[in-house]
Image (tube, rainbow, N blue to C red):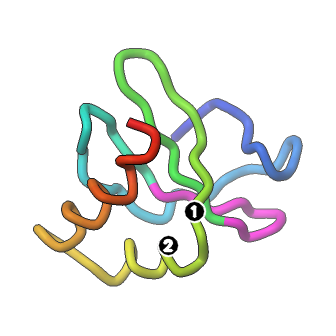
């Protein structure tokens, strides 16, 4: 579980929703704020990590896809910050 505070609600906890595929040398975890219900992906590699915002639509896709389709989606989604 990430120890970095969520950007949306100071002091709020996050719920781990789903482990996502590792792409672009990052490990990804889909999480949700327990206070405002906003979705975030925690992306980390080599002792570096941070929160990336996720739209409701992208969070729903991440939860509905699996296997190669999920990997392709996460790879495309993560291209903007890799």
Relative height, residue 61 to residue 71 (above, below): below
Q: Residue furthest front?
A: 80
Q: Secondary structure at mark 2?
A: helix
Question: Tags 2 and 1 in contact by the CB under 8 Å rule?
Answer: yes
Relative height, residue 48 to residue 25 (above, below): above
Which numbered disc covers residue 7? none
In the rendered image, the quadrant that contains the C terminus is top left
Q: Does 36 lie within the magenta span?
A: yes
The percent coordinates of residue 80 (x first, y second) are 44, 46
> Mark 1 or mark 2, which is nearer the start of the sequence?
1
Q: Dividing the picture into quarters, in which one does residue 61 lie? A: bottom left
The percent coordinates of residue 48 (x first, y second) are 47, 20
Residue behind mark 2: 59
The percent coordinates of residue 63 (x first, y second) are 39, 77
Residue occupying image coordinates x 30% and y 58%? 76
Residue occupying image coordinates x 62% and y 31%? 3
Which numbered disc covers residue 54? 1
Relative height, residue 6 to residue 69 (above, below): above
Q: What's drawn in magenta, residue-wise?
A: 30-38
Residue occupying image coordinates x 66% and y 53%? 14
Neighbours of disc 2 within 10 Å: few (<14), some (14-19), many (20+): many
Residue occupying image coordinates x 43% and y 31%? 44
Q: Is residue 69 left or right of residue 54?
A: left
Q: Residue furthest left?
A: 68
Q: Dividing the picture into quarters, in which one does residue 66 lie? A: bottom left
Q: Is residue 22 left or right of residue 6?
A: left
In this view, the residue in front, 79 or 28, is 79
Q: Residue furthest right?
A: 10
Q: Does 16 lie within the magenta span?
A: no
């Amino acid at each position: 579980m990430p120890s970095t505070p969520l950007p949306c609600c100071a002091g709020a906890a996050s719920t781990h929703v789903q482990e996502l595929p590792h792409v672009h040398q990052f490990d990804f975890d889909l999480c949700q704020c327990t206070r405002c219900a906003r979705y975030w992906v925690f992306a980390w590699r080599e002792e570096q990590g941070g929160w990336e915002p996720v739209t409701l639509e992208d969070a729903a896709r991440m939860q509905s896809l699996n296997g190669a389709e999920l990997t392709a989606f996460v790879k495309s989604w993560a291209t903007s910050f890799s």
